[in-house]
Amino acid sequence: MGVVPEVNEFADLSVIYRLKVRAPTPVKYNYLVVSENVDDISRIDILTLRDFHRVKDRLKRKSKVGAGLEITIEHARKMDARCAARWVADALALYEFCQSSGFQFILSSGADAPTAAVSGECFDAILKLIGIKPRKYWMELATWLESRLERRVQLC
């Protein structure tokens, strides 16, 4: 019979919780603080955007270098062809803004159930459609996640 590992031995698993507020006390799990309110940018890790152009100027003024700016595929799934084409153009504009402003571009499935999940191959195809090299994107995202989670552990 094997030894049952303690909870903190699982800290490197691929599960990262999305919280609305920072945990008030140290925790033994990975988490990122997420909001849809641009005014929260100084207190969060990820800002989820629905309309990048509407908040672009506010982001320039309130910028918190290193924060993630997220768009979701789930939102685009419900669009007609014209709106989907605009979503792709907006995604590229957001990516370019992130590259020039020190933010991390995040493309998320937006899934709230396993049936809404998006496969890795689909993510790569969407990244290519947007004009982003998938390998570069995944490497940048992994580096960003590692730095955010390391910083979180040091703060706890």
Image (tube, grey):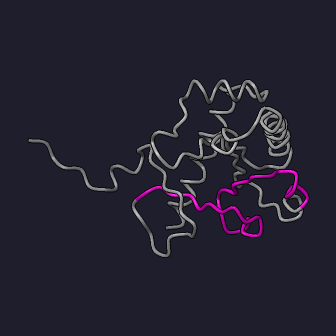
Q: Position of residue 98 (x, y in %)?
A: 80, 45
The residue at 87%/56% (across/down) is 54
Q: Nearer the viewer, residue 58 or 118?
A: 118
> Image check: 125 left or right of 22?
right
Bounds of the magenta span?
29-57
Q: Nearer the viewer, residue 73 or 128?
A: 73
Looking at the picture, does residue 85 appear above or below residue 8?
above
Tally the numbered discs: 0
- In the displayed orientation, state which residue is furthest to the front: 80
> Image check: 68 left or right of 32?
right
Q: Position of residue 122 (x, y in %)?
A: 60, 27
Q: Position of residue 131 (x, y in %)?
A: 79, 27
Q: Quadrant of residue 13?
A: top left
The residue at 68%/45% (across/down) is 75
The residue at 68%/41% (across/down) is 78
Position of the N terminus, as image quadrant, is top left
Question: Is residue 49 a member of the stretch shown in magenta?
Answer: yes
Q: Position of residue 111 (x, y in %)?
A: 54, 45
- In the displayed orientation, state which residue is furthest to the left: 1
Q: Quadrant of residue 32?
A: bottom right
> Image check: 118 left or right of 90?
left
Q: Nearer the viewer, residue 82 or 155?
A: 82
Question: Is residue 17 a member of the stretch shown in magenta?
Answer: no
- In the displayed orientation, state which residue is furthest to the bottom: 24
Looking at the picture, does residue 83 appear above or below residue 133?
below
